Amino acid sequence: MRGGFLHNTVLITPIEQFFCELAACVSREHPIRPGRGAPAVDLFIELQHERIVVEAELTARRITVALKKAQTLEATHLLIITPTSRTAERARYLLVEADPKWLPKRLWILPLGPALQALRDCYLHPPVANYTTPTPTTPTSTTLTSSTSPTLASPQVAAADLFTGKQRRTRQ
C-alpha cells in the first residue's frame, strides 16, 4: 500500500468506511490503467450510477495529477482530501490557475472533517422539497428557500458550499 500513516490511516480510511457502510463497491489503490506499476487512485467507488474517485493529497502540488487520474477513470465525482484547510485553499487556487479542460460533475477539495460532513449531507440525507437548484453563477452552492425543515437547528442556515466548505447564511 502506498502512502504513510497520515495518508492511509487518517485521511483515506474514514472515507473508505463511510462508503462501505453505504454498501458501495470500494476499491483501494485502484489502477487507472492495466499493467504492473500503473498509477493508481487512493479510492475508487461505484455507488449506484456514480463513479467516485478519492485522492488524499498532503500538499497542493499534485492537484492536476489527481484531476487527470479522475478523467482517465471517467469519474463523475472527485473528492480530494487534504490534511488542513490551508492546503485545500492552496489546491483550489492552483486548480483555478491550471485552467483544466475537463472537470467532473462534482468536485470537492476539502479537509477530512468538512469532507465527511459534505458526504453525509449528500448521501445520507434524502432530498428536501424546499431546496432550490443551483444557479449557473454559483454551480456548487445550494440554498434553502424556507425554514420548514424540522432537521435544521436554526432557520435559514444554508447547506455547506461543497467547493469551499464554508457555511453561508441566507435571509428571506
Image: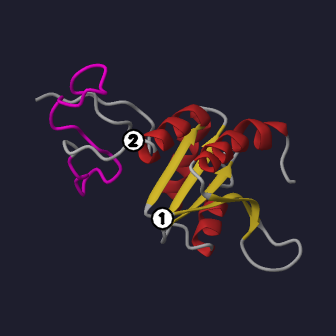
Is 164 left or right of 36, judged from the image as shown?
A: left
- Three-letter code for the amino acid on which mark 2 is drawn: His
Q: Is residue 123 left or right of residue 12?
A: left
Q: Nearer the viewer, residue 101 or 10?
A: 10
Residue 58 seen in this snapshot? no
Instruction: Give the residue at the far top of this rendering.
Output: 154
Residue 96, how many percent across, how many down?
48, 55
- Residue 155 in magenta? yes
Quadrant assignment, res 46: bottom right
Residue identified by numbered label 2: 125
Which secondary structure type mostly characterizes the magenta part of the structure? loop
Q: Nearer the viewer, residue 22 or 73?
A: 22
For marks 2 and 1, give the CA distance. 22 Å
Q: Secondary structure at mark 2?
A: loop
Q: Residues within 10 Å of mark 1 (few under 14, many from 20)?
A: some
**Which range is magenta?**
132-156
Say which residue label 1 marks: 104
Residue 52 visible in the shown view: yes
